[in-house]
Amino acid sequence: MLPLSTQGAHAYCQWLTDGTARFFLAACTTELKAEEIIALPVAFRVVVFNDTPNRYNWEKAGKADIPATDMLPQRYAKKDTITGKLSIYSEGNEKPATPDEVKGLGKC
């Protein structure tokens, strides 16, 4: 649970095995149970530094299974600003890609 305002609104995210977190599309004023949280739609998935929760007063809301689709490492689309060539970046590796292969991927 991460604070969004001083008026008590908060949001939720779930830590994933590759060091990213998926953030849920909800601003809540009441606490939800883990099962309710993971049923929320996902807004985005990004890398979060390990010290962020402590630094910004995030609280653990519970434990829930990670969906199989989110057990895979995050993949990002990358477009070279000079050549315009596309690639897919994942876990420190980059490989050439076609426009169809990068559809639906986050951008880095």
Image: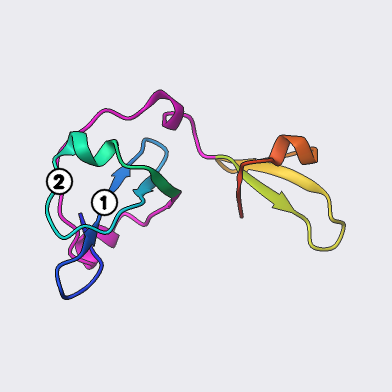
Q: Position of residue 72 (x, y in %)?
A: 48, 29
Residue 104 or residue 28, whichever sits in front? 28
Q: Find the magenta span and give its range.
A: 45-74
In this rendered view, identify the residue nearer to me: 1 or 96.
1
* Quarter location, residue 51: bottom left
Where is 70 relative to 31, above or below?
Answer: above
47 sits left or right of 92 in the view: left
Taking 51 as reference, is 23 above or below it? above
Q: Residues within 10 Å of mark 2 (few under 14, many from 20)?
A: some
Q: Position of residue 24 (x, y in %)?
A: 34, 48
> Which residue is pictured at 37% across the width and 42% down the height?
41
Identify the residue at horizontal 26%, vertical 51% (top origin): 12
Image quarter (top left, top right, bottom left or bottom right) of the N terminus: bottom left
Mark 1, residues whose alpha carbon is within 10 Å: few (<14), some, or many (≥20)? many
Q: Residue at x 66, y 47 (%)?
A: 77
SS majority, magenta: loop
Q: Amino acid at mark 1?
A: Tyr
Corner quadrant of residue 49: bottom left
Q: Which residue is mark 2?
A: 32
Report how far apart the C-alphas of labels 1 and 2 lie in the structure: 9 Å
**Residue drawn at the location 51% of the way across and 39% of the way down:** 74
Q: Is residue 57 magenta?
A: yes
Q: Is residue 108 left or right of residue 101?
A: left
Q: Secondary structure at mark 1?
A: loop
Residue 34 x %, y %: 18, 38
Q: Nearer the viewer, residue 13 or 73?
A: 13
Helix, strand or loop at mark 2: loop
Label 1–label 2 contact, CB within 8 A: yes
**Label 1, on which residue?**
12
